[in-house]
Amino acid sequence: MHMRFSRPSRKPDLGDADTVPKPPPHPVDEVPPPPRLALLGLQHLAIMYAGAVAVPLLVGGALKLSTHTIGLLVNADLLVSGIVTVIQAVGIGKILGVRLPVVAGATFTVVSPMILIAQEFGGGEAGLPTVYGAILVSGVFGLLIARFFATVVRFFPPLVSGCVICVIGLSLIGADAGLIAGDDPKSADYGQISHIALAGLVIALIVVIHRFARGLISQLAVLISMAIGTLVAVPMHLVDMSNVGSSAWFGISKPFLFGAPEFHIGAIISMCVVMLVTFTESTADMVAVAEMVDKELEPADLSRGLAADGLSAVLAGFMNSFPDTAFAENVGLVGLTGVRSRWVVAACGGMLVALGLVPKVGSVVAALPGPVVGGAATVMFAMVTAVGLRVLHKVQFEGTNNMLIIAVTLSVALLPAVAPNIYTKFPTNFQMIASSPITSAVIVVFVLNLVFNHWGAGTRREVTAPPHTDSPADDIGSRRPVE
């Protein structure tokens, strides 16, 4: 009698792709089709371009640099910004890049310190070797402390990060107002009704498209509105393409354009303080983006993102550029459009590199009318402030002094925003720090949070922790190591 034994069924191999389907990628890791990728990347570029070039324009104008020299600073700024943006989005191993839809751009925090240092050490181009020497050292400093800074994120709960994000958005409002109305109130062209109406048209178009459109059209609301605004601006003679023909097809500023870097301890300390503020600004923005895209931000992720900021300062020291931070405008754009793919931002970074290497293309983008860019920026800056308010919504106010902390922070931080010359009689080193609203906000809210909620607070250390949510990104700022 022959007995037949049934062959045992083979258990599925967990590593067998044929038996176990791969889980779908997180929306952050999804790669949109090439046309959609290019359009969404272009939208990120359009919304951040004005802010990116504003820093070299402000610094170059204050130091009375030639138009040609300022143009070289702009190209270098776009090139470094593009490189760091790609690194932030794509990442380099376990070393660099937060791998979130984060666009890197020149931080406004550096403007006042750069101008003051250059004026202190020779003025104009003569002071720039000291400026770039200090930036170079601050970049190395940033690379060295990035991992440590990421481990003390528990000192940046929603109370701290929310205040900083709010101040970032509010302090940038002056920049978009200058684009719309002009920078010189004494000029006959300042505050032209037609210019303000054009900016209003762009804002209205963004609202209408978001209200009635769906899908890709809704996600491209900012870019479409800016394109329509530019077409309207043509008969208003606000679109000047005269510089496009004279711009070169390829060009890059040589390293150490202004001479070998010089190192002075006062300038170095000031720039290292700027780096700490930049880290705090980037931390707040990365936490906000992680929350928007519903992805957990681990300390290791944050460390890689901050290290990329440090690298940007090292590159800036070599390439006559500026330290980068996570750009608040693009944080607002992620919240507005709901597009979470980091590869869209990587595409934007590639475009920035192209702009940095091809001045002619940069001239075309630079020809966008100020009121058009300013109108779109108004919405983006306000969106950043709204994100800050949403973060502050998690702060516990009952039985705490957190309301007082927020009030003092906003009042002190916005003083230099509404009265830029308020600290002119103070020592130069003090001006380098206090004249920046973002720097002031970081220092004040950080210290007050320590005083009220950490030092000697006993069990009240928990008062700034957000309520429990299903999103792990919601409480990144309040985590504490297990006792």
Image (cartoon, grey):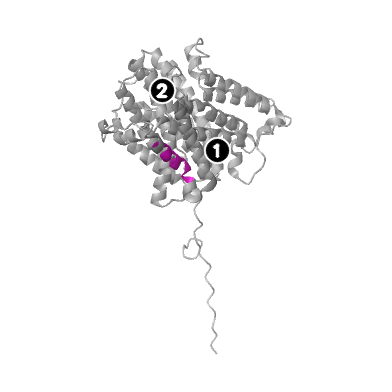
Res. 456 mark: none
Residue at position x 59%, y 26% from top?
446
Residue 274 appears in the rendering: yes
Q: Quadrant of the C terminus?
A: top right
* Quadrant of the image occupied by residue 251: top left
Callout in the foreground (1, 2): 2
Taking the magenta stretch, the answer to whether it contains residue 229 is yes
Residue at position x 42%, y 28% from top?
323
Q: For mark 2, does the 10 Å Cα neighbourhood hold few (<14), some (14 to 19), or many (20 or more) residues?
A: some
Q: Secondary structure at mark 1?
A: helix
Rendered location of residue 233, percent (x, y) = 40, 34
At label 2, which amino acid type do we have? Leu
Residue at position x 52%, y 13% from top?
423
Residue at the disc numbered 1: 288
Q: Secondary structure at mark 2?
A: helix
350 left or right, relative to 455: left
Res. 58 mark: 2
